[in-house]
Image (tube, grey):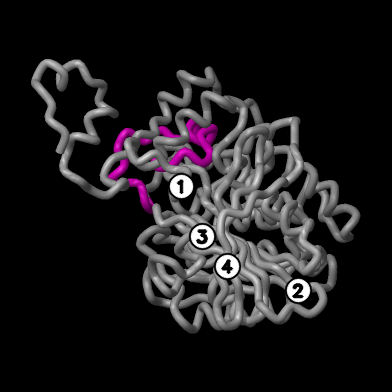
């Protein structure tokens, strides 16, 4: 440990002291601060009132402005209204979208596939580390699957099979099934994490650069920029691109698919919950930096970093949307919600997923494709057990 005299110690800001403390997990402290975000941005509570505002139940998606929607054309108007509300909370992405240029750093060949490490451009001057994995015997154009990682500082290395839990090595599993796979480091993770800062500490400089955006919006943007890159490859079929993720990768998959129709198939494992059934929006605005505007809908003084999962907060009913509406933006594309009924991260996820699927099925019914929306429920904690994995990969096989 670096030596540190008492006078220097007392002069250091709190966030700098962590490097002199005994080594510990990055999850033991959180540099992210919702109040700091407010100071940086000057944001105030969004002045939005919708049909979901003030209601404890998840609204019926086909009830809109006093009418019952009965055609896909009518649904498209409702869909646009949901997009507009969600866009307020996701924030505005950059107006400048540079070409998806890429620079290969290394390439390794295995018996049946190759793994390429490279960086690709997401914003002007910003290059994101990623892995592309492809079968060695490529004939024609292949389907591709984007595999965002879970909440782990292994980042992209876990889906690529280089670290972490074999359950979550989705990019490796899928390249062995004949898919081109792509995984990358989300901001605040992997090579995009400053080890001197705590969990989501990297979000503070992000919000300095982009006070009008959100980290969730940024993560969906980086994923979509990855699709821009995939579509430049002559061995990828641009009409057959899917996305699959666990936990953090699951919610990233859902938001990205909701706003990028090039994602033709989606699978989220242990990555979905609704605000109202979860009980509050603390996890999205305070425990993480993903959707900080939701922080204006937290009122309970009893919710904190140690106690927020499934904790009731009456203010949650005033959030002007809920996440089943975000799922509805994916219709009529195929979507599988794989959900644990004893998930300690999302303790009410089973109920949230079931209630949301009940709301989603009529939307898919407008298009006559109710077989494209499916839920799978299991017990096994916050995990991706073998049976869940088999069903998820079979879902991709079916639709790609």
Spatial CA span between label 3 and label 4: 27 Å
Count neighbours of disc 3 (C-alpha within 10 A) and say few if under 14, some if 14 to 19, many if 20 or more. many
Q: Which of the two marks, 4 or 1, is nearer to us in this view? A: 4
Q: Using a 10 Å C-alpha cutoff, classify the residue at mark 1 as few (fewer than 14 neighbours), some (14 to 19) or many (20 or more).
A: some
In primary-sequence order, the first of circles 1 and 3 is: 1
Within the magenta stretch, is there residue 290? Answer: yes
> Which residue in the structure is indicated by mark 2?
142
Give the residue number, with chain letter if any, for mark 1: 191
Q: Nearer the viewer, mark 3 or mark 4?
A: 4
**Image quadrant where one finds the C terminus:** bottom right
Q: CA distance from mark 2 to mark 3?
A: 27 Å
Q: Is residue 123 visible?
A: yes
Give the SS element for disc 2. strand
Q: Earlier in the sequence, mark 3 or mark 4?
A: 4
- Per the model, the C-alpha gap separating discs 2 and 4 is 16 Å
Question: Which residue is located at x 76 percent, y 42 percent?
Answer: 99
Q: Quick one: label 2 or label 3, which is nearer the N terminus?
A: 2
Q: Quadrant of residue 88?
A: top right
**Magenta range:** 287-310
The residue depicted at 80 percent of the width and 44 percent of the height is: 80
Q: Residue 169, percent across and down? A: 48, 70
Q: Is residue 355 visible in the rendered structure shown here?
A: no
By secondary structure, the bulk of the magenta-drawn segment is best described as: loop
Mark number for residue 115? 4
Q: Which mark is residue 271?
A: 3
């Amino acid at each position: 440990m670096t030596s540190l005299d008492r006078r220097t110690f007392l002069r250091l800001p709190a966030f700098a002291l962590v490097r002199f403390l005994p080594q510990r997990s990055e999850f033991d402290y959180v540099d992210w601060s919702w109040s700091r975000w407010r100071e940086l941005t000057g944001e105030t509570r969004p002045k939005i009132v919708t049909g979901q505002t003030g209601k404890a139940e998840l609204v019926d998606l086909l009830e809109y402005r006093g009418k019952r929607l009965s055609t896909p054309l009518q649904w498209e108007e409702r869909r646009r209204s949901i997009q507009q509300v969600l866009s307020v909370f996701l924030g505005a992405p950059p107006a400048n979208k540079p070409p998806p240029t890429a620079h290969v750093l290394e390439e390794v060949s295995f018996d049946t596939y190759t793994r390429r490490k490279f960086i690709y451009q997401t914003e002007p001057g910003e290059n994101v580390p990623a892995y592309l994995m492809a079968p060695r015997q490529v004939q024609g154009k292949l389907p591709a699957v984007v595999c965002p990682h879970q909440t782990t500082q292994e980042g992209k290395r876990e889906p690529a099979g280089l670290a972490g839990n074999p359950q979550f090595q989705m990019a490796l599993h899928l390249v062995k099934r004949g898919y081109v796979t792509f995984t990358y480091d989300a901001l605040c993770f992997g090579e995009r994490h400053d080890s001197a800062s705590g969990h989501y500490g990297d979000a503070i400089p992000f919000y300095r650069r982009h006070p009008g955006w959100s980290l969730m919006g940024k993560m969906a943007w980086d994923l979509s920029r990855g699709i821009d890159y995939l579509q430049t490859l002559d061995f990828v079929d641009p009409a057959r691109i899917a996305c699959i993720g666990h936990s953090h990768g699951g919610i990233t998959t859902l938001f990205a698919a909701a706003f990028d129709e090039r994602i033709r198939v989606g699978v989220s494992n242990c990555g979905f919950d609704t605000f109202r059934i979860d009980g509050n929006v603390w996890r999205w605005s305070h425990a993480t930096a993903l959707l900080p505007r939701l922080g204006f809908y937290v009122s309970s003084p009893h919710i904190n970093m140690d106690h927020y999962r499934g904790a009731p907060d009456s203010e949650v009913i005033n959030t002007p949307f809920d996440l089943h509406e975000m799922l509805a933006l994916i219709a009529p594309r195929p979507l599988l919600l794989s959900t644990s009924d004893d998930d300690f991260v999302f303790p009410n996820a089973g109920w949230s997923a079931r209630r949301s699927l009940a709301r989603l099925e009529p939307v898919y019914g407008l298009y006559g494709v109710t077989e494209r929306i499916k839920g799978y429920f299991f017990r096994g904690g916050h995990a991706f057990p073998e049976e869940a994995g088999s069903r998820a990969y079979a879902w991709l096989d079916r639709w790609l």
